[in-house]
């Protein structure tokens, strides 16, 4: 692949793998479609992993699984419908992954829900929904993955998807910012709980990753404004965030735990 100039929007990422996750079993939430979750699943497959993808959008989930299976081998991909706000579904996701592939080595908590609303106008229901998906869902999946990894004898990696909005102030984002800041704090503290079991927990904090779903729920004007603030003058592509997630999931980051890695081109 010819390297793009920083300000151009690259059309594709690296395709060749280096066996960074060879033989590992990776579970990725919110992986339907073309966002960060799907890009992470694709990168993990390219790096030799078996992958279980989950989402609550059943049709898009199975379409994504079919696409990934066609590219990387259907026997290496499983799909499981999961709403991270429902404990029983989270438990079933981890149990199904272990049943399909024998164990769970990496958990990528990508599920999140955003929106734009002033605190002055925000109803309790919207506040609770964003926090339940984004923060509580990450907690539920982290807890379930940790328990399974400990039962397996220890070892493993959890990577959470936070956001630079957990550091930055932005109008209309109080619920999302509070949830993502919570994900950062959860990552740091859970890492201390998990260290004695040889399990590492880290997070990525993207600034702005462009994909079709984001373009549907956010105005073009706001996206252009946010992209213009980036040093490269553009948003990240989902695969550019996925590359960092896979690095954190691999043995190349063996001494990192409790860390939040900013995936952006401007300082928090």
Image: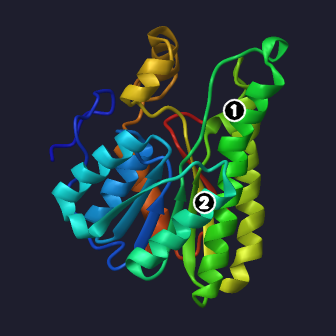
Helix, strand or loop under label 1 = helix
Locate residue 29, reporting x and y percent. Answer: 50, 53
Tell me, yes or no, if residue 61 can be seen here: yes
Q: Is residue 28 left or right of residue 183?
A: left
Asked whether the residues under the numbered discs 1 and 2 touch, taking CB atoms below 8 Å apart as contact, a structural biologist would say no
Mark number for residue 127? none
Q: For the residues marked 1 and 2, what is the alpha-carbon distance in whole angstroms?
A: 22 Å
> Which residue is located at x 83 percent, y 26 percent?
124
> Which residue is located at x 41 percent, y 51 percent?
242
> Which residue is located at x 53 percent, y 49 percent?
110
User: In what quadrant of the picture does the C terminus appear?
Assistant: top right
Q: Quadrant of residue 131?
A: top right
When the figure is inspected, residue 234 is found, relative to residue 136, above or below; the finding is above
Count of picture labels? 2
Locate residue 24, reporting x and y percent. Answer: 39, 76
Q: Is residue 38 left or right of residue 133?
A: left
Q: Residue furthest top?
A: 221
Give the mark, 1 or 2, whose residue is nearer the N terminus: 2
Q: Residues within 10 Å of mark 2 (few under 14, many from 20)?
A: many
Between label 1 and label 2, give the one nearer the viewer: 2
Q: Residues within 10 Å of mark 1 (few under 14, many from 20)?
A: many
Locate residue 132, reporting x and y percent. Answer: 72, 42
Locate residue 63, reporting x and y percent. Answer: 29, 44
Helix, strand or loop under label 2 = helix
Mark number for residue 90? 2
Provide the residue designation for mark 1.
176
């Amino acid at each position: 692949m010819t390297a793009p100039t920083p300000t151009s929007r690259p059309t594709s990422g690296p395709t060749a793998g280096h066996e960074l996750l060879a033989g590992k079993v990776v579970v990725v939430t919110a992986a339907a479609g073309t966002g960060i979750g799907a890009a992470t699943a694709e990168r993990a497959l390219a790096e030799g992993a078996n992958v279980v993808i989950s989402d609550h959008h059943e049709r898009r989930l199975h379409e994504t699984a079919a696409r990934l299976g066609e590219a990387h081998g259907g026997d290496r991909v499983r799909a499981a419908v999961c709403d991270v706000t429902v404990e029983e579904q989270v438990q079933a996701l981890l149990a199904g992954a272990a049943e399909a592939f024998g164990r769970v080595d990496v958990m990528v908590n990508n599920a999140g829900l955003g929106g734009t609303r002033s605190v002055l106008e925000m109803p309790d229901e919207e506040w609770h929904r964003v926090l339940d998906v984004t923060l509580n869902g990450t907690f539920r999946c982290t807890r379930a993955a940790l328990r399974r990894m400990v039962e397996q004898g220890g070892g493993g990696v959890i990577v959470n998807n936070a956001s630079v909005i957990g550091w930055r102030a932005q109008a209309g984002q109080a619920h999302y910012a509070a949830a993502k800041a919570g994900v950062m704090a959860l990552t740091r503290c859970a890492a201390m709980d998990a260290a004695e079991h040889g399990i590492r927990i880290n997070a990525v904090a993207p600034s702005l990753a462009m994909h079709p779903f984001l373009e549907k729920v956010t105005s073009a004007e706001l996206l252009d404004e946010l992209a213009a603030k980036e040093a490269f003058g553009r948003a990240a592509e989902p695969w550019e965030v996925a590359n960092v997630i896979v690095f954190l999931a691999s043995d190349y980051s063996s001494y990192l735990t409790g860390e939040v890695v900013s995936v952006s081109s401007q300082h928090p």
